[in-house]
């Protein structure tokens, strides 16, 4: 079921982006949604993506954002977008993207006791992530100078925010005594007792969830129809299970009651992989011991390099006519036709 859902999301994402780009290329002059001077832009983006969750981290107690990043797990995000600009200071964006997230306690340094507790936990995960979102863009300088016909800068900073949906599927590893590592989907194993009657507060989590993307960036206009840019894109999510770690350890005896024999065997090995660093000799935590931090949801963010192309004759500029931006400047230098 989950594989069909993931494949369906991928297929829908690709189809939406592909057919939207094709339609805007062919009919850019008429793709205006009732706004005669709107301009259509499509492009590609790629760049590093970073995970913010329970696993891994830096020296000291776990915190949030940049201080706790493990840069060795930097992943590449790839995507495409289509945007409609009814004016030069506002736009509506639709984007689809793919990335890969990863976290691992084993890489944590051993400077002090705080990080050793997390390193002793010894959990890991990795997951593909597909996302589709819509957002509103706002260009403050263009807005401030919207009545100035001569204001037509190459450098255009902006902020944006919107709503999206993403799909993830965390997998954890088991390494046998011969050093062979296998990866297993974690959600079906219910590693923290999700859906078990003995743990009524722990509910099963979905692999497709809503997120809130927002951030800031800038465009630099290269030609009438081409721009490049840099963007910081952060996602607020509503799940703490991107890495399958959130609350407390459970009594592994319940795996046998709720899972098949083969899944129960894997779940007992993978839900608690403690290595005795702070407490030598310990290999299991007592049920109820803290496993993760349920007070802060997982998140991820990207630093994206962007290439955008505007279709049709509109180009860039604030005049709303057929020859905007730098095309207008060059046109102003031409000799009158009668000469």
Image (cartoon, rainbow, N blue to C red):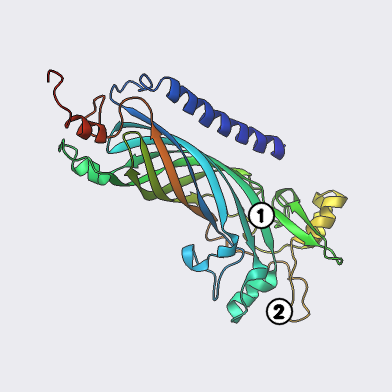
Please state which of the two labelled residues, at mark 1 or mark 2, is closer to the viewer.
Answer: 1
Q: In this view of the protein, can residue 83 be seen by the observer?
A: no
List the residue tagged with mark 2: 277
Mark 1 or mark 2: name the one nearer the start of the chain: 1
Disc 1 crowd, CA 10 A, few/some/many (<14, 14-19, 20+): many
As drawn, which residue projects farthest toward the front?
Answer: 339
Q: Secondary structure at mark 1?
A: strand
Say which quadrant the C terminus sits in. Answer: top left
> What residue lies at 16% left-to-right and 35% top-to-bottom?
149
> What residue lies at 65% left-to-right and 51% top-to-bottom?
127
Tell me the distance, in whole angstroms, between the alpha carbons under discs 1 and 2: 24 Å
Q: Left or right: where does residue 281 sit relative to residue 62? A: right
Q: Left or right: where does residue 42 sit relative to residue 192? A: left
> What residue lies at 64% left-to-right and 32% top-to-bottom?
8
Disc 2 crowd, CA 10 A, few/some/many (<14, 14-19, 20+): some
Dividing the picture into quadrants, the one containing residue 276 is bottom right
Q: Position of residue 204 (x, y in %)?
A: 66, 48
Quick check: 196 above or below 139? below
Q: Position of residue 229 (x, y in %)?
A: 39, 46
List the residue tagged with mark 1: 126
Q: Secondary structure at mark 2?
A: loop
Circles 1, 2 touching at the beta carbon (< 8 Å): no
Q: Left or right: where does residue 109 sit relative to residue 296? A: right
Quick check: 83 above or below 171? above
Q: Which of these two is toward me, 325 or 6?
A: 325
Q: Position of residue 77 (x, y in %)?
A: 54, 48
Q: Which mark is residue 144?
A: none
Q: Left or right: where does residue 129 sit relative to residue 90? A: right
Dividing the picture into quadrants, the one containing residue 92 is top left
Q: Position of residue 95 (x, y in %)?
A: 48, 37
Q: Which of these two is toward me, 81 or 250?
A: 81
């Amino acid at each position: 079921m989950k594989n069909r859902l993931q494949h369906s999301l991928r297929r829908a994402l690709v189809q939406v982006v592909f057919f939207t780009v094709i339609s805007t290329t062919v009919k850019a002059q008429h793709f205006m949604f009732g706004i005669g001077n709107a301009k259509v832009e499509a492009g590609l983006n790629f760049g590093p993506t970073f995970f913010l969750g329970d696993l891994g981290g830096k020296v000291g107690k776990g915190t949030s954002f940049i201080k706790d990043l493990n840069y060795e797990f930097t992943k590449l995000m790839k995507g495409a977008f289509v945007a409609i600009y009814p004016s030069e200071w506002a736009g509506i964006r639709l984007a689809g993207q793919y990335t890969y997230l990863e976290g691992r306690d084993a890489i944590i340094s051993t400077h002090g006791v705080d990080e050793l507790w997390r390193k002793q936990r010894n959990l890991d995960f990795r997951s593909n992530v597909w996302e589709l979102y819509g957002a509103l863009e706002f260009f403050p300088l263009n807005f401030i100078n919207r009545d100035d016909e001569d204001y037509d800068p190459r450098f255009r900073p902006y902020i944006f925010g919107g709503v999206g949906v993403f799909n993830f599927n965390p997998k954890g590893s088991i390494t046998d005594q011969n050093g062979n590592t296998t990866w297993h989907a974690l959600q079906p194993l219910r590693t923290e007792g999700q859906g078990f009657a003995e743990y009524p507060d722990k509910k099963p989590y979905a692999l497709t969830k809503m997120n809130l993307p927002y951030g800031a960036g800038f465009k630099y206009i290269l030609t009438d129809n081409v721009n490049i840019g840099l963007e910081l894109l952060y996602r607020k999510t509503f799940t703490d299970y991107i890495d399958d770690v959130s609350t407390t350890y459970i009594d592994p005896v319940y795996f046998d009651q709720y899972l098949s024999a083969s899944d129960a065997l894997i779940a007992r090995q993978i839900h608690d992989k403690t290595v005795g660093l702070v407490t030598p000799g310990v290999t299991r935590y007592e049920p109820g011991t803290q496993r993760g931090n349920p007070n802060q949801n997982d998140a991820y963010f990207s630093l994206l390099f962007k290439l955008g192309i505007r279709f049709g004759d509109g180009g860039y500029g604030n005049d709303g006519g057929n020859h905007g931006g730098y095309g207008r400047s060059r046109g102003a230098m031409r000799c009158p036709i009668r000469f």
